[in-house]
Image (spheres, coloured by chain):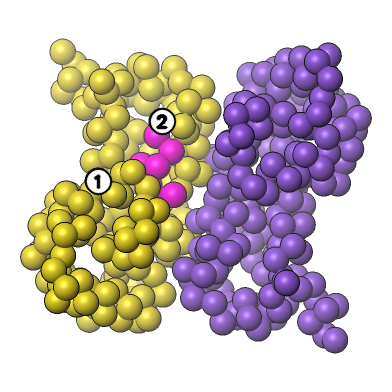
Chain colours: A purple, B yellow
């Protein structure tokens, strides 16, 4: 049962961080920071506060966010140490069911990507299927670092939006 | 066995974050961000990079860091869900062995502090004994919010320094 925005606004910082702390993967500081800006008018306003906090970070901070993300179909998936959210998202896109040729290809491209940029390939798995993810992983390896930093952060925000929508009623529902 | 700074500088971001990611409690983004600034001349330079990243955050971000910290002698200690680092630090200061009067007093003051400031009381437990921690908890409840925000961040940096010193050789050792 998703919370309405009034319930979200009434949460102590501890409950707010416990419930919403992983909307940006392994970055509870971001959730914890935006609590300072409550009350939020609606889910869109909460999402905007998170985006603004991210946008105000220096480039190193944006890269820091990306570096807190696991590889797609990487060792955290294989060892079972993904966060619950990541596990469900990766499984939904079929990342847990690659054939051995696909798995080798993803592993090679992930390494190439990380070697080139110093952060992992981040994509909103729930908005892409397996074929599309593999294609983008290959294509995005060719970009410049600044382009990929910005692109990765865009994907972080998409992931965040979907995670938020799984926890908080969307604006349309609040108006009912 | 602590790493020397050359070993630290040679780490991939993944190993860097795996090993050093909790030098600021539950804020691996900070460790992950400063990796962008390597190589570090020595431990002091690494510590300075972390401090500078923290100092450049908006007030909400500094409060976000504080909100990622557990209460002293709080429910995370009781339920065994503290990070390893926090558990050892709190135990070292006797926070896991309060008598019932002390425990009640700490619980009441923690609630008072959080109600007043919207973030938890943070203190470097390894640099204080139980009596001193209880005294400061009581006294710091009387401060202004901006003073406590800054004071809490000072304590975060002390905790960070000691955690770093447990992982990386100090400058003097590097010179041997």
Q: Chain of mark 2?
A: B
Residue A15 in magenta stretch: no
Image coordinates of residue A58 in percent, x first then y, are: 55, 46
Query: Magenta segment range?
Result: B20-26
Disc 1 and disc 2: Cα gap in Å? Answer: 17 Å
Q: Residue at x 67, y 69 (%)?
A: A46
Q: Which mark is residue B88?
A: 1
Say yes or no: labels 1 and 2 on the same chain.
yes
Which SS class for mark 2? helix
Visible residue check, residue A147: yes
Q: Residue at x 23, y 53 (%)?
A: B90
Q: Earlier in the sequence, mark 1 or mark 2?
A: 2
Identify the chain of the residue marked 1, using the numbered disc in the image: B
Mark 1 secondary-structure assignment: helix
Q: Observer-nearest residue: A128 or B63? A: A128
Mark 1 or mark 2, whichever is nearer to me: 1
Residue B50 vertical placement versus B19 (above, below): below
């Amino acid at each position: 049962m998703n919370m309405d925005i009034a319930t979200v606004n009434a949460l102590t910082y501890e409950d707010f961080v416990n419930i919403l702390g992983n909307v940006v993967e392994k970055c509870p500081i971001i959730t914890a920071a935006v609590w300072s800006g409550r009350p939020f008018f609606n889910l869109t306003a909460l999402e905007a506060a998170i985006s603004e906090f991210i946008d105000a970070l220096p480039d190193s901070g944006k890269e820091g966010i990306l570096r807190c993300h696991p590889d797609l179909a990487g060792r955290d998936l294989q060892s079972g140490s993904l966060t619950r959210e990541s596990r469900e998202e990766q499984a939904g896109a079929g990342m847990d069911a690659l054939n051995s040729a696909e798995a080798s290809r993803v592993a090679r491209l992930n390494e190439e990507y990380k070697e080139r940029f110093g952060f992992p390939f981040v994509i909103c798995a729930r908005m892409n299927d397996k074929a599309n993810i593999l294609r983008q992983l290959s294509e995005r390896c060719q970009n410049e670092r600044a382009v990929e930093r910005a692109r990765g952060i865009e994907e972080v925000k998409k992931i965040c939006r979907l995670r938020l929508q799984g926890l908080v009623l969307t604006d349309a529902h609040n108006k009912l």
